[in-house]
């Protein structure tokens, strides 16, 4: 896998400055040593981990999947849900054991949890064997933090938003598809969400830099890019003289990359112009993740989502009517404080009206520091669990129905790799983001091929060439 030039990264501040983050002197200091990197949470974290991996490899570390072999362990954490903390604490037990066995191992924590108020102190007090902590805004200092680690713990978490980085090194997980950050942070401040506090306010990259990155990926043989941000369709709003997201999509489409996806979009920022551009370009995939969160306008208001049930439905139908064969998926939270049975029924009604291709569903859990955490939550857990169960049954029935429409059809699939469960099969995704397992196509990895669908389940399709 090719690593980009690690010598320089430019950080865009008010005045464009050159920042040399890596001296030749530091390179290969840890030659032959191994790193173990574990990622929790969303695609943003997955992509951050690609940067962390590149920075570790620039120092000479090689990747290992075996914790016990590691000379440095980095845990890239998530703060979105309460159980993310529990999962991390569970894994820290193994790290503590490793530290006892291997005194020189470096244990590091980064990501959104490291950025949460009071959490760093709590972690460091409880887990004194942790050596380094860094936040979401200063990944670029990782090499320095490792090099400077002496006897004591090395903590550097910036409370400010951070800058926009350009020429960031990534060790991309795939040679077929790539994540491309187009913005960082979020300005929406939905009342339940910790992201604006852990990742800061919205900062968009310049469109020329994004296009340059995509052109480079095309040159290197990548077939697909996913434009990444917490709220991609608000792209550029805080920048003077920058194009909007619809125009950015169009510019990316003109680079000739074969497939373009984007995630996540907010219904409030979804414009008619965007819908038209998606419909116009064949290389912008007909797949949209459009978080609903609740089907009750009362709950949506409490969530600070800025749209009503009716506005969501209008947008949904406009997208369905304008973009041929589009697949739409969603996110739904159940058991938000004050959600009555009637409000929950409204969510089920919207699901019935939209018949989503699939959905990520969650039970609400308060995140400390958010406005929603201050609302008294009187809904018993059994009620929340029952609502989630009902919702999942309904969603799964529509997922199956949506997948069954593919039976007997021939669709284009980008083959990504060998199936983990069965090495005689490969897996890939349709244009509409349906997972397909394909027989006897191991020589087709990295290609977009025609696949005939032979079986449909709720979560995947089977097919053959
Ligand atoms: S749009 Fe709302 S839910 Fe999404 S990241 Fe921003 S604040 Fe969080």
Image (tube, helix red, strand yellow):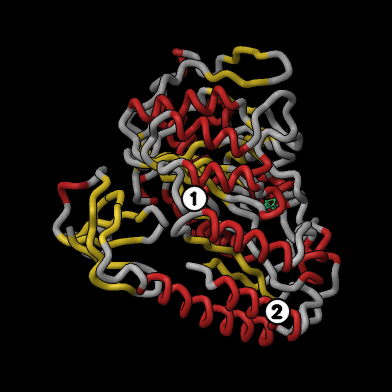
Please give the label number shown on residue 39.
1
Residue 401 at least partly seen: yes
Q: Residues within 10 Å of mark 1 (few under 14, many from 20)?
A: some
The percent coordinates of residue 423 (x first, y second) are 19, 59
Residues at marks 1 and 2, CA–CA distance in whole angstroms: 35 Å
Residue appearing at x 65%, y 21% in the figure? 12
Please give the label number shown on residue 265.
none
* Image quadrant assignment for residue 334: bottom right
The percent coordinates of residue 359 (x first, y second) are 53, 67
Q: Say left or right for 11 vs 33.
A: right
Q: Say left or right for 128 vs 40.
A: right
Residue 368 at least partly seen: no
Please give the label number shown on residue 346.
2
Q: Nearer the viewer, residue 50 or 88?
A: 50
The percent coordinates of residue 371 (x first, y second) are 83, 59
Any atom of ligand 1 within 8 Å of the CB at mark 2? no
- Does dot 2 land on a helix, a strand or a loop? helix
Q: Nearer the viewer, residue 169 or 232?
A: 232
Residue appearing at x 25%, y 44% in the figure? 447
Residue appearing at x 68%, y 42% in the figure? 234
Q: Say left or right for 175 vs 438.
A: right
The C terminus: image quadrant: bottom left
Q: Say left or right for 387 vs 97.
A: right
Q: Nearer the viewer, residue 1 or 57?
A: 1
Location of residue 209 with respect to 464 vertically, above or below: above
Residue appearing at x 67%, y 76% in the figure? 347
Location of residue 273 with respect to 395 vertically, above or below: above
Query: Comparing marks 1 and 2, which lies closer to the viewer?
Result: 2
The percent coordinates of residue 439 (x first, y second) are 17, 61
The N terminus: image quadrant: top left
């Amino acid at each position: 896998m090719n690593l980009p030039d690690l010598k320089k990264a430019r950080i865009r501040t008010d005045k464009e400055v050159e920042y040399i983050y890596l001296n030749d002197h530091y390179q290969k200091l840890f030659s032959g040593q191994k790193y173990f990197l574990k990622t929790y949470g969303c695609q943003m974290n997955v992509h951050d981990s690609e940067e962390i991996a590149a920075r570790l490899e620039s120092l000479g570390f090689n990747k290992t999947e075996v914790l016990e072999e590691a000379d440095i362990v980095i845990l890239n954490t998530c703060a979105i849900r309460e159980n993310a903390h529990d999962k991390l604490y569970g894994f820290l037990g193994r790290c503590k054991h490793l530290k006892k066995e291997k005194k020189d191992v470096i244990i590091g924590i980064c990501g959104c949890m490291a950025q949460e108020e009071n959490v760093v102190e709590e972690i460091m007090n409880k887990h004194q064997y942790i050596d380094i902590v860094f936040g979401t805004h200063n990944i670029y200092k990782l090499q320095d933090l490792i090099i400077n680690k002496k006897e004591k713990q090395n903590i550097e978490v910036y409370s400010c938003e951070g800058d926009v980085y350009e020429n960031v090194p990534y060790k991309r997980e795939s040679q077929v598809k790539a994540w491309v950050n187009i913005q960082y942070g979020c300005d929406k401040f939905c009342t339940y969400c910790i992201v604006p506090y852990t990742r800061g306010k919205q900062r968009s990259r310049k469109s020329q830099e994004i296009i340059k990155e995509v052109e480079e990926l095309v040159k290197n043989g990548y077939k697909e890019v996913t434009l990444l941000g917490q709220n991609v369709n608000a792209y550029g709003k805080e920048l003077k003289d920058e194009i909007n997201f619809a125009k950015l999509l169009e510019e990316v489409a003109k680079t000739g990359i074969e497939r373009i996806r984007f995630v996540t979009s907010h219904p409030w920022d979804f414009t008619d112009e965007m819908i038209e551009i998606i419909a116009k370009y064949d290389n912008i995939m007909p797949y949209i993740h459009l978080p609903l969160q609740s089907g009750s306008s009362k709950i949506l208001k409490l969530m600070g989502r800025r749209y009503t049930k009716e506005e969501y439905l209008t947008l949904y139908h406009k997208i369905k009517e304008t973009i041929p064969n589009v697949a739409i998926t969603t996110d739904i939270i159940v058991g938000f404080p004050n959600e009555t049975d009637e409000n929950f029924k409204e969510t089920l009604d919207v699901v019935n009206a939209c018949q989503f291709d699939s959905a990520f569903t969650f039970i609400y859990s308060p995140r400390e520091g958010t406005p929603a955490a201050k609302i008294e939550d009187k809904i018993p857990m059994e009620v929340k669990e029952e609502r989630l169960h009902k919702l999942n049954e309904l969603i799964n029935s529509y997922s199956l129905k949506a997948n069954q429409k593919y039976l007997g059809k021939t669709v284009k699939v980008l083959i990504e790799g060998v199936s983990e469960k069965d090495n005689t099969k490969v897996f890939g995704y349709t244009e509409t983001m349906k997972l397909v397992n394909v027989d006897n196509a191991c020589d087709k990895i990295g290609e977009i091929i025609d696949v005939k669908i032979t079986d449909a389940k709720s979560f995947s399709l089977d097919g053959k060439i």
